[in-house]
């Protein structure tokens, strides 16, 4: 049984790296952001409570997030373990987590702010079918057009330089203390997230003592 937390700023490849690791080790990948997005999409009561915050990229209140994480982990569908992504996001959530669960490691994907800006500002989204593109790593065949449905590619509303600068500031204010708290417990593996995704995955595995 392996229990991991993965942390990293937006654009650091957190979702991709967790999915690769989860697939291979049969871990359940728990993305708190995905859980909230599901509730919003399905118009649940919780969805109505968090819709505005999720759309604005602001953090949902700690009590609600802790309930969601507790309920999700109580399903106990994680026979081989889990990798949780998007939680904890601040010191209080980290303290709650440490009191409630023992974890085997914290994978901290480290990406300089300048590279985050480059990656995030290159993101595009199809206005018709929602397919994601990235002008650095995944360009459309025809500039500005979706390969799948031919729809117009647009920038996400919250991917402007100003909004990003605010998110970077918020991220560091909240996450740096969490990394320090976990580091005090000697859980943290800081991984350089700049190389390509296969290299990053290999580094994670070797740091976790897994076959690469
Ligand atoms: P993510 O996909 O991880 O960026 O999460 C999407 C959105 O879900 C965030 O912008 C927040 O509104 C909410 N969210 C996800 N995880 C947390 C968390 N640990 N604490 C508070 N809000 C969260």
Image: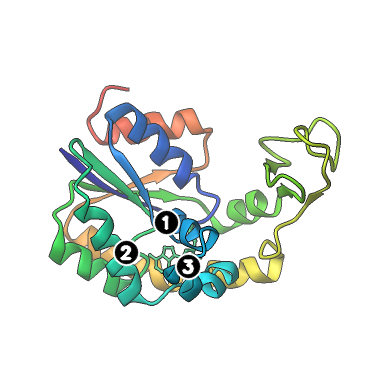
Image coordinates of residue 81 in percent, x first then y, are: 21, 40
Q: Tell me the residue at 28%/31% (across/down).
A: 26
Image coordinates of residue 37 in percent, x first then y, are: 50, 58
**Neighbourhood count class around disc 1 (C-alpha, 10 Å): few under 14, some 14–19, many 20 upward:** some
Which residue is at the front of the view, 38 or 82?
A: 38
Q: Secondary structure at mark 2?
A: helix
The part of the image, by quadrant, that contains residue 87 is: bottom left
Which residue is at the front of the view, 132 or 127?
A: 127
Residue 30 located left or right of residue 146: left
Where the N terminus falls, by quadrant?
A: top left
Task: Calculate the distance from the C-alpha at mark 3 to the C-alpha at mark 1.
Answer: 9 Å
Residue occupied by mark 1: 35
**For residue 68, which numbered disc appears in the image?**
2
Asked if disc 3 is less than 8 Å from ligand 1, the answer is no
Asked if disc 1 is less than 8 Å from ligand 1, the answer is yes
Q: Tell me the residue at 53%/73% (across/down).
A: 53
Residue 166 located left or right of residue 81: right
Circle nearer the N terminus (3, 1): 1
Q: Secondary structure at mark 3?
A: helix
Between marks 3 and 2 in the image, the one whose residue lies nearer the viewer: 3
Circle nearer the N terminus (1, 2): 1
Image quadrant, ligand 1:
bottom left
**Neighbourhood count class around disc 2 (C-alpha, 10 Å): few under 14, some 14–19, many 20 upward:** some
Q: Is residue 58 visible?
A: no
Is there a contact, CB below 8 Å, between mark 3 and mark 1? no
**For residue 47, which numbered disc appears in the image?**
3
Task: Calculate the distance from the C-alpha at mark 3 to the C-alpha at mark 2.
Answer: 12 Å
Between marks 3 and 1 in the image, the one whose residue lies nearer the viewer: 3
Image coordinates of residue 64 in percent, x first then y, are: 34, 73
Task: Calculate the distance from the C-alpha at mark 1 to the C-alpha at mark 2.
Answer: 8 Å
Is there a contact, CB below 8 Å, between mark 3 and mark 2? no
């Amino acid at each position: 049984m392996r229990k991991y937390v993965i942390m990293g700023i937006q654009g650091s490849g957190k979702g991709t790296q967790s999915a690769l690791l989860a697939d291979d080790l049969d871990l359940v990948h728990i993305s708190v952001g995905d859980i909230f997005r599901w509730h919003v999409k399905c118009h649940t009561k919780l969805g109505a409570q968090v819709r505005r915050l999720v759309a604005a990229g602001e953090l949902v209140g700690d009590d609600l997030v802790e309930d969601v994480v507790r309920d999700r982990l109580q399903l106990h569908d994680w026979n081989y373990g889990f990798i949780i992504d998007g939680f904890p996001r601040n010191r209080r959530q980290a303290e709650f987590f440490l009191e409630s669960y023992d974890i085997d490691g914290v994978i901290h994907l480290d990406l300089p702010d300048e590279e985050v800006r480059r990656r995030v500002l290159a993101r595009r989204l199809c206005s018709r079918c929602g397919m994601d593109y990235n002008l650095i790593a995944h360009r459309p065949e025809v500039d500005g057009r979706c390969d799948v449905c031919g729809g117009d590619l647009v920038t996400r509303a919250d991917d402007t330089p100003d909004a990003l600068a605010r998110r970077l500031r918020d991220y560091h204010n909240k996450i740096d203390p969490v990394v320090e708290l976990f580091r005090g417990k000697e859980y943290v593996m800081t991984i350089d997230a700049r190389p390509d995704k296969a290299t990053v995955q290999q580094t994670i595995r070797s740091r976790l003592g897994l076959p690469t």
